Amino acid sequence: MGFYPIFLYRKLRKKDTVWVHCVSVGEFLAAEPLIEKIKTNFPNQQLVITTTTRTGQKLADKNWGHRAVILYAPFDYFYAVGLFYFFVRPKAIVIMETEIWPALIALAPCPILLANARLSKKSLGNYKKIAFFLKPFLKKISYVLCQTDEDKSRFETIGFSAKSLYVIGQLKYEAAITNKEKVQESTLLDVSTKETITLLAASTHDPEEELFLKVYEEIARKSSKKWDLILVPRHPERSSQVVEQVKEKKMSYVTYSELKKSLTKTWTQDVCVIDTIGDLFKMYAFSDIVIIGGSFIPRGGQNPLEAAVWEKPIICGPYMFNFDKIVKDFLSHEALLQVEDEKDLKEKLTLWEQNEELRVKIGKRAGACVRKSKGISQTICDRFLKNMIDGEVL
């Protein structure tokens, strides 16, 4: 990575450029609201988006290939990075999260900004071991926009200048808001129109479906209300396996692909199994309670922000270590419930069944947690990127 077709170099050298680097899909999705604002606020700047992974490259090309130049990032060797800079010549560089590449930083011909910057306790320990080596490179980074005060403190510990560190929150929160706005503009299918409680188990892993089916069956049997269950396997190719589990329970079911083909676009079965790609986000709109999959086994959970932006009450299991900062934020605002096991899950679902007002309040708190970060992308453009592009970084 570092060698590109000559016609591309000629195209790139004609314009001033803002370069946004995202390692993979997660970073790219978090960066999209910022990328949109960069395009709007700086229309005279050419936009170059790079990724490291193939999946990130495909998504970036799909979403932005018509409006930006999409490339793989160069390997962090001085010759490769030097060649990249010779042709791209950025006016500003935005690196998502915490990618500290010595060659990229050392040879940069312009200011660098770390956006959505975070530093885990484990990463802090690793960086401390090489802090002496990194210190000269860290001085070349103009702005580090941290997610939390804790992140800011950790970045300062490894050698970043205090004057370069700012706490502005999570870009992922704003990305969730943007995704909702896009969905609202499209035609939504009606998953259920019945007067009922619809339970959505999102991004589930084996053997969680068995647990959720058991809990659903027991609650539905004892309840005076009608309950529905939407199961969304994290990997759609497992949907046939999930359907077999539903059959074993002798529950009525429908798959979402079948529902899409129907004329009524509604369902009367107990369980709806989502066997399609890219439809989970819409499902939140039709749910009353959301359970976060991957959190009842040691998989680290899934992102709760997409449920929160729809103001849905959220329950997760004990294993949310991949999203610990978000969970801590939500728990501190009483915007999420974290349970320990199957028994605890049943008790909390029963409580929410009996107290609709409580679950509505929790859902609204979750929505408020997300909305507090609205406008971060515009702030980055106004306070930081404009100075970088104008050459006015202090």
Image (spheres, rainbow, N blue to C red):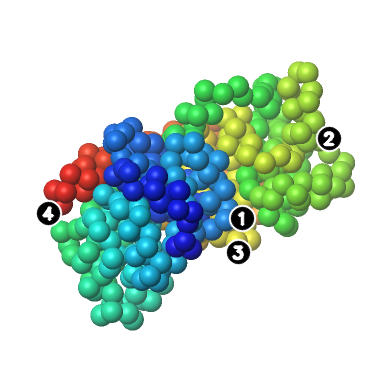
Quick one: 168 or 394, which is closer to the camera?
A: 394
How far apart marks 2 and 4 lie (CA) works out to 65 Å
Q: Nearer the viewer, mark 1 or mark 2?
A: 1
How far apart marks 1 and 2 lie (CA) works out to 25 Å
- Amino acid type for the residue under numbered disc 2: Ser
Q: Earlier in the sequence, mark 1 or mark 2?
A: 2
Local SS, label 4: loop
Mark drawn on residue 298 = 3
Quick one: 206 or 240, which is closer to the camera?
A: 240
Q: Nearer the viewer, mark 4 or mark 3?
A: 4
Image quarter of residue 132: bottom left
Query: Is the residue 15 above or below the residue 22 in the image?
Result: above
How far apart marks 1 and 3 lie (CA) works out to 7 Å
Local SS, label 1: loop
Q: Position of residue 257 (x, y in %)?
A: 76, 33
Q: Position of residue 350 (x, y in %)?
A: 62, 40
Q: Earlier in the sequence, mark 4 or mark 3?
A: 3
How far apart marks 4 and 1 lie (CA) works out to 45 Å
Query: Is the residue 223 above or below the residue 162 in the image?
Result: above
Quick one: 235 or 301, which is closer to the camera?
A: 235
Disc 4 target residue: 394
Local SS, label 3: loop
